[in-house]
Structure formats: C-alpha cells, structure tokens
Image (cartoon, coloured by chain):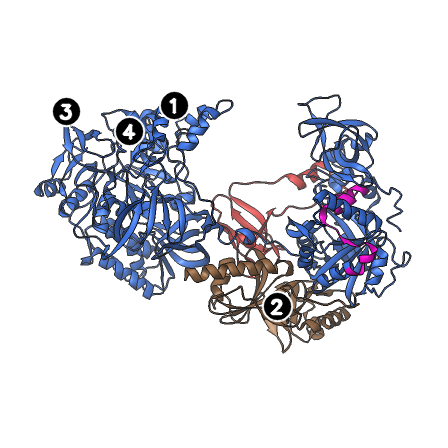
Chain colours: A brown, B red, C blue
Amino acid sequence: MMLTAVSPMGIAIGKSAALPAITVVEAQERSDIGAVLIVTTRDGGGFAETLSKALGCTLPLTHGDVLQTVDKRAIWLTPRSWIILCAPDDEADLVAAINKAFPDREANASRFSDALAWLTLDGEAAENLLRQGSFLSFEPLGFPIGHGKRTPLAGIPAIILRESEARWTIGVERSRAQYFCTWLAGLTNSFEAAQ
Amino acid sequence: MIVLNCPYCGQDRHEEELTYGGEAEIIRPLEPEEASDELWTEYLYFRTNPKGTHHEQWCCSGGCGQWFKVARDTVSHDILEVVTFDKRLSA
Amino acid sequence: MSGYRLKSGGRIDRSKPLNFTFDGRAMQGFAGDTLSSAILANGVGTIGRSFKYHRPRGIYAAGIEDPNAMLEVVDGHGREPGLRAGQVHLVEGLQARSVTGWPSPQFDLVSAATRLMSPFMTAGFYYKTLKWPNWSWYEEAVRKAAGFGAPDGTVDGRQREYRHASCDVLVIGAGPAGLAAVSSLKGSGRDVVLVDHASSAGGALRWEAAQIDGSEGMIWADKVVADCQADGGQVLLNTFVTGAYEGNYFTLIESLVDHRGLKAERIWKLRAREIIMATGAVDRPLVYQNNDRPGTFLSTSVRQFISEYGVAPGKRLAIFTNNDSGYLTALQAAAAGMATPVVIDTRSAPSAAHVEAAREKGIEVFVQSQVADVVGGRGLRAVRVVDQAGKIRTVSCDAIALTGGATPMIHLAAHRGAKPIYDEASASFVCATLPKGWHGAGAATGSRELADVLAQGHAAGQAIVATVNSAPVANVALGMGDVVPMWQAKTGSAKKMFVDLQNDVKASDVQLAAQENYISAEHLKRYSTLGMGTDQGRTSNINGLAIMAAATGREVAKVGTTTFRPPYTATRMGAIAHHRQNDGFAPRRRMPAHSDHASNGAQFEDFGWQRPDWYTKNGSDREAAVGIEMTAVRTGVGVFDASPLGKVEVVGPDARVFINKFYVSNLATLKPGRIRYSVMCHDDGIIFDDGVVACVDDNFFLAGPTSGNAETVGAWFERWRQTEWPDMAVAIAPVTSNWAAIALAGPKARDLLARLSPDFDISGEGFAHMHFREGTIGGVPARAARVSFTGELQYEIAVPARYGQALMQAALSEGADLGAVPVGMEAWLRLRLEKGYLHLGADTNGRTTPLDIGMGGVVMKKAADFIGKRALSLPYNASEGREELVGLKPVDAPIKIGGRILADGYAQIPCPSIGNVTSACDSPLAGNIAMALIEGGSKRMGEKVKIYAEGKITEAEVCSPVFVDPQNERLHA
Ligand SMILES: [Zn+2]
C-alpha cells in the first residue's frame, strides 16, 4: 500500500495552482515549496557555520534577512532558529544531513513542509491586502525586496516574503490555510469596491 | 495601544503582536525545597503593582518569539526602557 | 416652521437636483446637500419624536451634534436604522424615515401612552422602577418608546477596509487652526496626515465670512490643502478620528461615498509622532421653557445652513444669544434675504459694533432679555421675550437660533486622560495640559476669534518644526466676542426646559438628582441619563453640569465633567468587525482529512479545530450514532482523527533534564522508545495540561500536549528556557501541524494496522503498550505510539500532513471487514470516561492539583524539582478536604453533568455544596456513569451523595472512576 499526498488546498505536491476566489491580485497555492525547521541549542548562530556547511546555504543572522542559493532560501526566525525553503523532495535529505552533522543534537532539523501552506500574491494591490491584516510596514523602505518577516496576518501567524515590488509569498500554518484564503477572498471583494 | 521595539528582531511590534508576561525580575528561589512557605508564596503571588514605573516582561510572540524586559509608566503608558532579558532595567 | 431653499448661495450644485423621500414624501435636494439640509429645505418641521416623552422634534443642527435627527436611511448600498442626518450625503433615490414615532412622527400614538407615564419618568426612573418585582409593569411601554429603529436582520453588505499606517504629524481638523498648522509645516519634510469629518476642508470657513492672507477663506483653505498634498501629505476627508489611545495611536473611520450612497468604510489604525488637535467646537444651546420645539436650531448651524447649503431654516428668525456670535447669524440671515430677524441678547452691554451693524440692517435687538416661553406646538409661531423688568413681549418668528457660547471638542485629548478644566474666559471646559506630543489650536482650546485661531495653529506647527513660513493673517469684520454665561432662563418651568434633547433630560431632572444627592458629574449622568445618548451629550453636558453647580451652590469647575470615552461618534459595528464575520470571524482550523469527514457524515463541532463530534449513519440520531461508534471501538476497531494533538520536539544534550522539569512524573528514567503519561502544572501547582511524552532517543523527546494547548505548551517550554534556564542546551520545535495523526482503537486495531503496511514489528511483544516507534506506514515516514485514551488496544499513527487524507481513507477501507468506523469526539470522550481517564478542563478546574486527581504517589516518587512541585506542599494545597476526582454511579436517576453535590446532612437546596459532576454519560457497557470533584472524595468510597441538577435532587454513590476493564486486559491485548 502506498499513500498519496495532497496539498493544503487540495492540489498535488510539487505544483502551483491558481486560487480563483482571490481576485484583484494573482494568487497561487505553492505546493512546490518545501521546508525544514532548524532549531539550535544556543542563541546567536553559534552553530551557523556547521549548519551552513551541512545545508550548502549560509544562514542569515538578523531579522528580515533571507539568504538564498539556487535551490534554497534560509529565513531567520529567532536568534536560534531558521526555516529553510527547498523543493519538497529535498526535505528528507536536508533533515538527514543536518542531523548527521550534530550527533548530540546541538542543532535539530525537523520536517516542516507540511506545517505550512504557501501562497504567492502577485499584483500592485497585494500591498494593500497585506496592510489590512498586519501591523508591519509594507512600503519598500519598511519591507525591502528580498526580505522575509514573521508576523500575525489576519490574526494568524504568518511568514511573509517580498519577492519583488508587487510579488509576495506567504506561509501560513496548514490547518489555517482555508481560513486565510477565505479571508483574502472576502478582502479582495471589498477592496475592489473601496477603490 | 502599546508599541514596543523588540530588542531581538529590531521591529516595532504592536500590542496585537505582543504577549504580556507580568512583572519582571521575579526570582524563582534556586532551592525550592529549602524555601519557606512564606518565601514561595511571595514568589508565586506577591507583586508590586506600582503607580508609575513598572518593570515588565513582554514577548515578541507574533514575531521572533523572544522574551524581553520593559520599563513602563503605568499612568502615562510611556515606555521608558526596553532591554534584552539577560539585562537589568535601569529606568 | 417652514424652512426653504434660498434663491442663491451655498456650496451646493444647483445644476444637479436629486430626488429622495422622507417618510414616503417625494422631495428634492441638490448635490452637496446633507440629508439634514435637504429635509430642511423641503419645509419639514417634525422629523421625529423624543425619547421619553415623544415630544415632536425637528432638525436642530447641521452636523453630528444634532441630538434629534436620527433617521433610518436606505441608500443604494443598504439600509441603516439610526443615522445622524447631518452626516448623510444626499444621493439620488435615497429614502429616509423617521424612527421615533408610530405610526408617524406627526400622528404619534405612542406619545399618548408615554404621556400618561411621564410624571414617573424623571431622574432615577430606571433606578427606581426597573427592579424586581415590578419592573415588568413598565418594561413593555419603555421598550416600545425607546430606541432609534431596529436593524432589519440582513447582513450588512457595505464594504469594509482596514489600513494600518503611521505618520509624523496627525492634524485633526481641517478648519482654520488645523490648516494654519499644516501651512506652517509646508516644506518641513514632515509626513503629514490631515483629517476632517466633513467632505471638504475649511471647517468654519465654509460658512463664516472671512478673508485670510488677502483671499476669501475657502480659497485660502483649498490652497493649503493642495500644497499639503503636493508636499506628499495625506488628506482624509469624510473621516472621523474616533479614538485616541496610548502611544499616540488613533482609530479613524473614513467613509467612501459614491453616487449611490455610503459604499464603503475604511478603518485606519494610525500611529503619529506629533498631534495637532484642531477639533473645533460646537454651539451650546440655551435652556428655557419649551426650548425643544421644532424650529429650534443652534446658531452656528443656521449660518452653516444658509451659507453652505443655501437653506433658510425658517421665514423669520429670532436669535437668542449671550455672546456676539448671535449677531453674525442675524446679519447672515438678513443678507440672505430672509425676513428681518430679531436678536434677544441676555447681556446688558453687548458689543456696540455688533448692535450697530444689526440695527443698520433694521434688525431689532432686545438687550438684557431672555426667552420666557414659545408659542406653537409642532411648529414655532412666536417667542415670548422677557426683559430685565419682567415685561413680556411676544415676537413672531418660525425659527429660533441659540448660542450660549461654544463647547470645545476636547474628547480625543480626554480619551488619553487629559483633564478638562473649566475656563472662565470662554465659559467652557478645555484641556489645560495635553498628552505628550500633542498641540492644541483653535476653538478646541477655547479660542473664539479667527486671528487667535490662526496664530495658534501656526504656533503649533512651529512647535513641531520651526520653518520660515509666516503666519496666516485674518481679516474679519465682526468677531465672536466673550461669553456671559446664562445656564438656565430665570422665567419658566424647569420641567419644560430641556437640557439633553436626545435623552429627554430636563433642568428639573438635574435638580431632582441634586436633591436626591446624586451630585457628582458621574452620578448625575447615570441617575438622570444626561449625556448618555449616542450624541454623548455634545450639546447638553455643560448646561447640565452648570445647572447642577447652581443647584448645589458650587462653581461649575467644582462639578467637573464625566469621563470621555471612545468612540467620538457612533461607529458601525460592521466597520469594526471588518471581515471578522461568519467564516472570517476566527480561524477555524481544518484537519487534513476534513473533506473525508464531511463526506462520511461528520457533524462538526468547533474546538478551534473543526472536529467531527459524531457521524450520521442512515439518519440515526446523535445518541444512537455515538452508541454505534463506542460499540465499534469495544468490539472491532474505531478510527479517530487525532491530528490536532500537540507535537513538540524537545531536543539537545539537556533535553531530558529540561523536559523533566515540566511533568510531575519522573522522566529521568524514561528509556528510548518508551512513553509516559503525565500532567503538567503551573508553578502554583495547578494542572494546566496532560498528555504523553515519548523518548525518541536520549537527546530527543516528543511531548504530546492536548489539542487545545498544543501551541500554548510549546510557548510555555520556550518561555522557561529563555527566562529561567537560558544556559540549558535545548532546542524546542513545535511541529504539530506538520503531522496528521489517526488513532486506531479496539480489539482489532492490530489487524488493521498490519494492513497499513508498517515496516516495523507490531506484535504484542514487539510493540507493547506505552511504546514508541519510528518507521514507515503505507510507504511514508511515520511515528507510531501505542497509547490508549479509550482503554482498548490503541495505536496513534502520525504521518506528514499531506498524507493525512490518504491515511484516513486507507484505514476505513482496509478496515471495512473488521468493522472499522470513523469515531467522533463524543464517543471518544465517553470511552475515556468508561475507563476513568481524565478529560482536562472538564474534570479539572482552576484549583485542581495532581494530588486531587490521585497522582500523589507519582509526585512523591519524583525526587527532582518540577514546575509546581514546591507549591503542592503549601498548606492550602496539602490540606484535607480538597475537592478530589472520583467516580459516581446513580442510585435513583441518571446523573447530570454540572450537577452540584449537596453538603453532608442536607436534603434540600439552598445549602452549601461540596463539589460538582464534571463528566457524565450513558455507557453501552456500564450504564449511566459519571465523574465528580468532591471534597474529600477519595475517602468517601461507597458513600451516597445527593446531587442537585436541573431542578431535581437525585442520589448517587461514590466509586472508583474506572468503570470498564479495571484489570487493563483490553489495554494490554
Ligand atoms: Zn522580536
């Protein structure tokens, strides 16, 4: 017997699919994004070097910074933890590589691809959508392109990445993905009217 | 509406992104079994509740998840000082 | 009364007529009208009935300060029951209705009934009558008389938007003071947000005749606004600042209006470094007999109706004043071509310039005079003027304009705790000290003359950043002058002098409150309902406080004001709710197999997560369905979705020492691959969570908090790590959502698990109770725990969430011939009750310790310290007679959950209680069973207790809570 996988919004893994209920911006579910959660036992990136070597990707040491390679992005979460975005198929290998580098588990990697649902919002209106659910500043000065931040969005924890001026990728916890899409859909309706 | 600049992530965090954790500098006696009932009760329940400068614990729960210390004026709500948890407040 | 549209004048667009209706009557207005000005222009006198006495009332003011003009409005976007007419932009097709008279305000039948009651409806009415046992005598009549319309029960379809923003300078009010501040900041590089509730900037310049910097006031205003926008400033019109909060944080509500009406509202949450409070003032009425008749207006509003909307409020106007501004109204009325007005001035020595200007236009001026009464019921026909000598003259007029001075709008500063101080010069309350970063300017500070207002605004801007910009210069022919207070007319009955028109509070009510010793401002408010209307007493509070001062022989300053609270003006619930309605109200969390549950007939219950409570089976009811699910678990196998169960990885060299500090059981000896059940306490010894902990390896523990506490427990670990044990080498990874989990429970659970292709030994010996395995199931990574919540052979299998749906489907299809059925929360909780297992939060409360649930032995055996341990030996936790968890069996009737246990020796209520039933159900195996927290419960085995529930007293016997399989034979199968 072999179990098959589906994404939080019901698409196959490794794909992206449009979310038609969300208008005004182009919205997609991104099940082509996988993730690994790294937590260490010391603050301040004490193990960052070993981790970077095992990962093949440098870890950022300050809030907002996202460092990336061809196939990975490392997002600063806390002074001792990061989320690594990768292809879903690479998740297991990354977890194994890190845990092998730390036999005493001073740093730990956990599977995290299934903890979060990822959405990409593309369009000028995206900034205004985000502003309705978050206290962060979304102007280019307050949220530079390439940065990633963690904040409550629409009342739920979220990780927000700014990919370009008008393109944002947002990770929300899987069980709340449906709620988040409903929230966005409702918002885009009102936003159109309020223009 | 309280807005604090988190000393760990450097971001201005609004009240809705923060968690309040009660008075700061509450010391848990190191040897609980040696502590008298009075001392333990003091540790558990007694707080200063001042009118004026209050030392508090806050957590950047919506952001970087770190606990830090804040000196706040309970009358004006002015934020007098914010420090990382390993430091002592001077205000 | 007979208001009409003037032939010319106003800022309305006469080329754009708009049709609307009021109480079904077709009327016409113009683009630029408000509902107030349009109704007035159509000659309508009575627009509603008053709150308590159902007296006829008319339009009273031009803006939100109007206590009377509450109307139901239907526009192209929706219907709303109680809008202030001065705030509603007139649009084509708008329908307005009176909401305070039945069947209509002109022929009001309610008033006949309430008039009978009116002698009773004085101050303290609610205090004195609305109490048991005779409140019901009044309730029906009061309910019928009260309120400002009802919602129609449909969903509010208007659009909502939220904005979060910050700025350097927030200028509240785009009148001359605010604009002077904005102009002084020009070119300073400061990020300015200018807010005004009106649809155009200018404030009083919209209706006052004034020149600034050599041009007409409004031209100057438009230029300042344009400059501000060119400078990058943001100008928000149709926007109220509704609240001011600490940290200079503000809530704003912006109305977005189109040709069909109010289309959308935008709530701003805005933080500002510096604030210019230029919120202006409103006219204060004068208190005299029958001062509430339709045709009575605030004086400034009359100027606004004439100059801004081109509407004359009546054919002939009388102006009742105690300051020079009344003359400005008279002169504007005369200039607009209305019949020559009269001025009734309370003062002995009014400004000679004003009197002369008035008399030049033929305006008659009565000095040292007051209004003693009015003639006319629904329409004003004349006023009776009494002079110093007591001589009364009747002066015909169909409208009267009142000014008793101005009331500064200090609400926002007061929201922040700034104390209102009585200022003798302006006879008003102002805030002498403003919050940090605030600068006051203009009428909001008690200033009356335009030159002062502009100078203050300029100075406020310069206080933020000194620029070279010069102060605007005003050129005004006649000023507002000083105010000589007159709080209550000397002639006439206090019982007919209205102080608060919205709430029908009279001068006599204030005096009665004084007589009955409700003399503080806060008591007066509650006792008499003065200022408790939705207008928040804008026009009434100061008069009421002054009358209280007089009645108690105090100065006005000594009476003080009541507390100002947000919102500044009535705010739609819908705007605040935003999208937090229906499914957007709160995040409903979905399990990975949600849609499968739905197609299996799940009846969902909201536990934060949407969880199946039970599954319908061929139309069976809940009790039958739950019984079937329980029987399946006891005889075959049940499949339960356990995905929400918490999963927190605790990892690192110090992981074992660390996690041992949280649970009351000893985890120092827990071997890899083994699991232990335990509870967790706060440091006061009170249980706050329970669950199992698995030791994956010596440096890796997996904690399984309850579903409801999954996130809390992760944060709890993290808090102690950061704040108390920062040097411990431990990493905490909350991974709950990454894993979907199902539980297989029942004698055939092992058979079913075998069919799901585990790659590890699942034999009874190879995978014993309380063991943990990692491997694969169905070809995907899996974590499996053999634990039991039901008392049966049970496995909990977790796989990455993406496989959750497939796993649920596989378990049900592979197990079909084993009798596998999906099991919901209700059956699950009853199964655990049969086994006597604790349900956290139901069988424990905010006082329950591990000692109270029979874990004393476990606690005693643990040598190491843990959170909550020391508190357990504090006297009140260690004392005898605490409530302890026990089982109950019925003696005479089924036990009801929530029932109170009667104290020993009592057979009737009322009596002391010694505990309550915490869980109860009917069990297919054990009949009616229950658990209860009872004082000294563990020492009461076999005792009979009486339980009070749902009006009946029944009897039950205290027993062990384990009702099924006390030998654990099923568990270890
Ligand atoms: Zn932070």
Q: CA distance from mark 2 to mark 3?
A: 86 Å
Residue furthest to the bottom in view is A70
Judged from the image, the secondary structure of the residue bearing numbered disc 2 is: strand
Segment colored magenta: C813-839
Whether discs 2 and 1 lie on one chain: the answer is no
Give the SS element for disc 4: loop
- Indicate which disc, 1 or 4, sits on the residue closer to the N terminus: 1
Q: Quadrant of residue C903?
A: top right
Which residue is identified by label 1?
C120
Residue C617 drawn at (x, y percent) = 72, 50
Label 2 near ligand 1 (CB < 8 Å): no
Q: Nearer the viewer's eye, disc 3 or disc 1? A: 1
Q: Are marks 3 and 1 in contact (CB under 8 Å)?
A: no
**Chain letter of disc 2 in the image:** A
C-alpha gap between disc 1 and disc 4: 17 Å
* Residue C90 in the figure: left or right of residue B70: left
Q: Residue type at mark 1?
A: Phe
Identify residue type, mark 3. Ala
Q: Is residue C612 magenta?
A: no
Mark 3 or mark 4, which has the lower sequence index? 3
- The verdict on a common chain for dots 2 and 4 is no
Q: Cβ(mark 4) to ligand 1 < 8 Å?
A: no
Mark 2 = which residue? Answer: A75
**Residue drawn at the location 75% of the way across and 51% of the way down:** C823
Reading the image, the residue beneath label 3 is C389
Q: What residue is shown with label 4?
A: C497
Tag 1, which secondary structure?
helix
Do the residues at pointers 3 and 4 share their chain? yes
